[in-house]
Amino acid sequence: MAARLDWSGKSDAFALAENGKASALLCDEQKTEALALSLASQEPVVLVGDNLNGLHILANSGLQYHFIYIDPPYNSGQQFSYFDKHGSSLKNDLSEDAWLTMMTPRMILAKKILREDGVMFISIDEREVGALTLLLREIFGRENHIGTLKWKKKRKSSFLDKHLGNVIEYILIFAKDAKKFPRLLGEKSKDITRPVLNASNQIVERILPAGTTAKARDGKYSAGPRKNKTLEAEFLQDFEIRNGKLVSDVPVRGRFRISQDKLSQTVFITPKLGLRRHVLAEELARKHASDDCTNWPTNEDGEQELRKVFGERVFDYPKPAGMLCQLLDMCQFQPNEEILCLDFFAGSASLAEAVVLQNNKDGIQRSFTLIQNTEPNLTGSRFATIADLTIERSRVSLQNQNKMSNLKVYFIKEK
Ligand SMILES: C[S@@+](CC[C@H](N)C(=O)[O-])C[C@H]1O[C@@H](n2cnc3c(N)ncnc32)[C@H](O)[C@@H]1O
């Protein structure tokens, strides 16, 4: 039997995903008019209010998302100011039970609004990565846990860290259905040449074919070993380079890592008579993504991005849009359809900026929905609530989008 979490309030937490289906409405800013979430237009949207209500509204609307990213509160000892009315008995509770009770219905609803081939990425740190992984495996199924990315949030640990410097965070990846989810792709290789020798390979003989490109000076050279950094290949015959090409076939011995066939197609002689090869077009194709994301943009980059837009500190610990661009880029859905992206713990709207940046870069059409409550913004900046910031950054981001689209803002009202 799979490992399961148990906590006080678990059954109530699961029930919250069912209850409250009809307890919220979408309204205009004056909260007078009930609005229908438009299904036809896939315009970017910000929903202002509690995300449990927001998720119920999305689930009722029938919208289905390709891509969900969330960065929920990490249960780091801060007050759960976001706690919904259904969980009010746990209001001042900072325990793991309370946190799991908050997360559970939201995760169930998130799964519900994912498309069959959709995926959800969830940022979390070392404090709750264990509990959250088990909870999500229970909700999504263990087989749909695609993996966990390791992301470096800062370059150096802080001397304030008590026992251990924490620089790594995690991004859990859950597919609605791993069998239908397209493979995650890594970055395109930027190297256009590669070594042909490798210290741990066997010594073998190969032929350098006549006509091989040579970057060394034209001339006649004697047989013997030639070093390429620390590895050497032994030319078994004298040879000549004329007009930048090898004049006749030359046998060579060395710790070759590639076949004769590939060598013949790609090898060249370096200016110092070493051997290297060109990379074939098919090798430049994108490969599997890796879980090592330690060279992605960091929290510091996120702060700088936001300061660049507003000229002051408007939010603590925004995620870098550059990191979210990497996640968007990893997911290759069917071309020619608009990709719907959602962040229901939106904060400073870094997903809005990432969607615009990535659309401009690769020409794929993505749209976003953000949900953010009206929690006060404690940075003392011009934005009194975090939702004010979410809306403004979304608007500013859209102004930079090649293809213009307008932001729609809806307010969630309790019935
Ligand atoms: C860790 S922050 C996310 C930061 C965001 N990823 C960014 O890059 O700016 C979590 C956000 O979720 C919001 N939030 C927490 N509980 C919420 C709830 N129940 N409904 C809507 N928003 C909530 C908080 O106000 C906060 O802005």
Image (cartoon, helix red, strand yellow):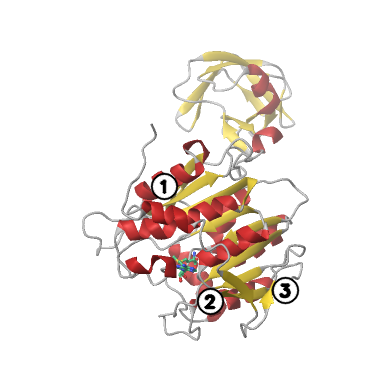
Q: Secondary structure at mark 2?
A: helix
Q: Is residue 413 left or right of residue 122?
A: right
- Check disc 1 and give the amino acid type: Leu
Location of the C terminus (image quadrant): bottom right
Task: State the residue at coordinates (44%, 43%).
Answer: 138
Label 1 vs 2, first from the N-terminus: 1
Can residue 291 be seen here? The reply is no
Closer to the chain start, of discs 3 and 1, is 1
- Whether disc 3's CB lies below 8 Å from ligand 1 is answered no
Which is nearer the N-term, disc 2 or disc 3?
Answer: 2
Q: What residue does disc 1 label?
A: 135
Q: Nearer the viewer, residue 212 or 283?
A: 283
Above or below, 378 relative to 290: below
Rendered location of residue 295, percent (x, y): 47, 52
Residue visible at 21% across and 59% down in the picture: 162
Q: CA distance from mark 2 to mark 3?
A: 17 Å
- Per the image, label 1 sits on a secondary structure element best described as helix
Residue 309, disc: none
How crowded is the residue under tag 2: few (<14 C-alpha within 10 Å), some, or many (20+)?
many
Identity, as a three-letter code, of the amino acid under mark 2: Ala
Secondary-structure class at tag 3: loop
| Residue on which disc 3 sits | 406
* Residue 7 position within the rendered picture, expressed as x and y whole percent measured from the top left: 32, 51
Taking the spot 47% from the left edge, 27% from the top edge, the residue there is 231
In the rendered image, the residue lying farthest to the left is 163
The N terminus lies in which quarter of the figure? Answer: top left
Indicate which label's residue lies in the foreground, 3 or 1.
Answer: 1
> In the rendered view, does 343 fall on the left or right side of 100?
right
Q: Which mark is residue 387?
A: 2
Task: Left or right? Give the position of 285 relative to 198.
Answer: right
Is 11 rendered above or below residue 202?
Answer: below
**Mark 1 crowd level (few <14, some 14–19, many ≥20, 10 Å Cα):** many
